[in-house]
Amino acid sequence: MDRLIHIAAGGIRLLLHGHAQAAALCVRKTKNGREVLLLSNRSGARWGIPKGNIDIGETSSKAAARESYEEAGVRGHVSDEVLGTFTYRKPGRSWPYHVTVHALEVSEVDDDFPESAERRRKWVSLAEAARHVHEPGLRDVLHRLRSHPRKQYLA
């Protein structure tokens, strides 16, 4: 399936073969530094970050913020800046999923959210997140961010 998507506010339009998704690297400040949120898949077998489809007329940053609340119960300021991208395939699907990753600075964490019965959350360092995520492409994005932190989100 080919889709014309709007990646960022005022920004880029791409024609993709596959399915466009957005993800949020949810970051919070603690007394020990910054932590990122990992989220289990519905079966609980794998760890990743909130991600999902970009709706028609929605920017990838807005989709990342929406998915963060629906899947993980977190809200905050989402950056229009793209931290990285990766591609993956789901078993049994012939098309690839193209994922655009944005930072979300967490200001609110709710325990009651749409997918709370299906997901587990854990807060970890960026290094630990890179070791635990399932998708190799996401792991690569996290390793690159460890080497070259972006702005105030991960420094």
Image: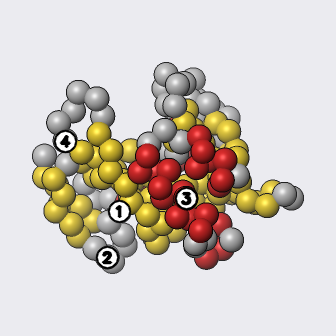
Q: Disc 1 on helix, strand or loop?
A: loop
Q: Which residue is mark 4?
A: 95
The amino acid type of the residue labelled 2 equals Gly
Residue type beneath disc 4: Trp
Residue 72 in view of the camera: no
CB atoms at circles 3 and 4 under 8 Å apart? Answer: no
Task: Specify few, some or many for label 1: CA neighbours under 10 Å numbering under 14, 14-19, or 20 or more.
Answer: many
Q: Nearer the viewer, residue 53 or 155?
A: 155
Q: What number is the disc on residue 11?
A: 2
Asked if disc 3 and disc 2 are in contact, CB closer than 8 Å, the reply is no
Q: Which residue is the site of mark 1? A: 59
Q: Secondary structure at mark 4?
A: loop
- Kindly check if marks 1 and 4 are in contact, taking CB atoms under 8 A apart as contact: no
Q: Is residue 77 above or below residue 18?
A: below
Counting residues from the N terminus, which is met first, the one under dot 3 or under dot 4?
Answer: 4
Foreground pick, 67 / 32? 32
Closest to the observer, 149 or 120: 149
- CA–CA distance in space, label 3 to label 2: 26 Å
Disc 2 is placed on an element classified as: loop
